[in-house]
Amino acid sequence: MTKTFPGVKALDDVQLRVKPGSVHALIGENGAGKSTLMKCLFGIYQPDGGTIELDGKPVTIRNTNDALKQGISMIHQELIPVPYRNVIDNIWVGRFETKGIFVDEAKMYQKTEKLIRDLEFEIEPKTLAKNLSVSQLQAIEIAKAVSYDARVIIMDEPTSSLTVAETEHLFRIIRRLKAEGRSVIYISHRLEEIFTIADEITVMRDGQYIGTWDIGNITIDQLISQMVGRDMEERFPPRAGSKQDEVMLDVSHLSSANPRSFRDVSFELKKGEILGLGGLVGAQRTELVESIFGLRKLSGGTMKLNGKVIYNRTPREAIANGFALLTEERRATGIVPMLSVKENALAAAYRVLTGKLGIFNPKKLDAPVEEVCKRLDVRMANTQMLIRNLSGGNQQKVLVGRWLLRRCNILILDEPTRGVDVGAKYEIYRIMRDLTAQGHSIIMVSSEMPELLGMSDRIMVMCEGRLTTILDNVNTTQVDVMQHATEFSSKICSNGD
Amino acid sequence: MNTKTLSWPNIKKTLIDKALILAMLAMIIVIIIIEPAFLQWRVLKDILTQSSIKLIVALGLLFPLLLGGTDLAGGRQVGLAAVIVASMTQTLNYAGRFYPNLPDLPVIVPILIALVVVAIIGMINGWMIAKLNMAPFIATFGMSTIVYGINCLYFAQEPNRSQPIGGIKESLTILSSYKIFGISLLVYIALLITIIVWFVLNRTVYGKHLYIVGGNKDAAKVSGVNINFIIISAFVIESLLVGFGGVLEVARTGGANSAYGFSYEFDAISSCVVGGVSLSGGIGTVPGVIIGVIIFTIISYGLAFIGVNPNWQLIIKGIIICSAVALDMRKNAQ
């Protein structure tokens, strides 16, 4: 099966064979193509090539309805309930039992109750979805998937919001489904978990099929090296030789106001270094950096900038303290699409570049913008063109320029090269090196292992909201990072066993 | 597609983008063909005078529109400001005075009172939208009935009992009656306000931040823009402008009643949209609004001039507004 998105080959000739009555785990790093493959199976995406066979017969799946009819159902990673409708409606939407033109409420109630009881959950069918906890919603989602009487059930990170006991409960359900002859495709980042429940494992990497193993024939370490085992194809600009020891930012015992997010994170950021921040989806890296920048609330901990305590309660305060943030979602929280390159570049800097009354002469602002765009090598016709007409990489450069015009000292880059083509990636890396050489410090959140290893002076790894390690990036390998990124998830599972 | 060529798709695109302006120009030409007398100096002067107050109100509405919002209470604020000012600027010897014992106040006093009242309304509008996260459409819709209620209560006071207010002092009506080169002072006032608004939007940090908040609120927040301040102040500025429009209405008509200003916000929003202001926020220029207001006035004046039934005029205006919004969606949707 092959699936291409503009600019990326998300799936490249991938295969997956699932036996009846078995649990088949699908693993790979973020962006390996697992979710894309499942979405193709479930009819959300249309593959560009390849076939799907059920019991040896080829089937076409044009939309989710086709998938359900063929007996494939899916538990989504993100839960999407209808908040003001009750459990019954959320499970049976589109398939109501009717009496004439009326919905047969009594029958629906009984059916729902039986379904939930069979799965050993305790949820009153008439509860509104908005009043359910996350794990109850997950239970409803599982009940819904089972209710389709599906032969293949896809579970995309089903345990990401479950406790140990709830995970155990889910495993009991999975074993029962298996005993009934159904197959489960199980996607998870928690490797220990997979060894508990799965019969077979398929590994994907960079949109390619790597291999399938019986669970008994492979160890965790082998699995990790299969997941990450690629050569460093991308090139990175050389690191500046001198090592910086002057501490710029000292973060200690930082905890999020959101109890589900990060807690007790401490680290130091040195002047002129690139501090990489690695981890899997759900490690709360974005939440951490956005909290440092004042976009999210903290419940405890201190930050010291050059020895002085700072708070960063709002982005404005953070910016005044010399912080800058390049957000993960360039379109949603970065660019202002209908404005020009110039206006986008100046968005953060107007206040400092203009006089006291906030009145300016636009001609005087041209020179600094031109200079920054030239320094960052933004490819464009002129600074008056709309930013939405630039490529992703050039948009990203303009956003870096936005912070340079504001003269920040600490740059936080959240996935700086996401959606950027290879050529522009190298240029962004070069810019990062230039900036650190000039004494700026960078915190770089990245899900791309080679980037993390190729660019960082030190690598901080998070797992489930906690900092697991800070590695000096000397002879560090992807396996080292991966092991720390899954540290707690393994422990949680082994505690549960 | 980087280079612009005179190929058919490009011409087609240009035609669609400019379709509304072209259609309206065609309408004006038709009006002139039917009634060549439309082209006279007197008509032009009338159109300029009629456009003045509409332009000030439309420039007011431009602020919430640039934020992707709207103010459905705009017209009612015109009315409230008009009634407040009129009630305090009657000549001392006028028979039915609103405040029979009111001393001879300088005109500026009632004007400032009216502007403070509408500024408070604007502040509440902005607060509901910025702090309570209400949809501007709903928040200001509620506000419009509140403002109208307040206006009617005030207007119904003893001894006025909802009688139209007349006998306005010459020191206020002079704003409309005084002419320079045969053109009403209203036109010059509108011109001055237009220049100020253009300056605020194009030459101040405040104006730039307004466009950025309207274009992408989250990006503005990350860039350290104080979003709540921008939203609330935009509604205050808008209220001050529409309130001042109400003051000028009193000067122009020499009186006021509680129905003043009704549906002015719709004309203003329509003019803005015709002038290229996007209802999704972030897009819109002062020259665009001027063109929108003038074209709109020409068409309503012209249709009346050639004797089109006023009910048909409403239908034509409605069609223009719907087409303008449809074109905006087509142009600015991504």
Image (cartoon, coloured by chain):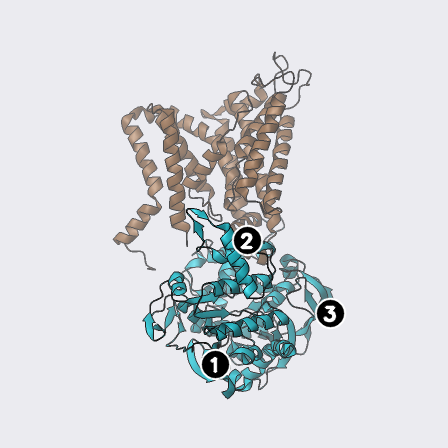
Residue under the image location 34 percent in, 36 percent down: B24
Which numbered circle lies on residue A200? 1
Which numbered circle lies on residue A307? 3
Chain drawn cyan in the picture: A
Which sits in the foreground, A240 or B257?
B257
Chain letter of the residue carrying label 1: A
Give the residue type at disc 2.
Asn
Relative to B162, does residue B51 appear above or below in the rendering? below
Q: Is residue A199 left or right of residue A321?
A: left
Q: Mark 3 Cα within 10 Å, few/some/many (few <14, many 20+)?
A: few
Which numbered circle lies on residue A86? 2
Q: Nearer the viewer, mark 2 or mark 1?
A: 2
Give the residue type at disc 3.
Gly
Residue occupying the far bottom of the picture: A217
Residue under the image location 68 percent in, 18 percent down: B102
Chain letter of the residue carrying label 3: A
Chain drawn brown in the picture: B
Q: Mark 2 Cα within 10 Å, few/some/many (few <14, many 20+)?
A: some
Give the residue type at disc 1.
Glu
Badge 2 or badge 1: first in the primary sequence:
2
Q: Are marks 1 and 3 on the same chain?
A: yes
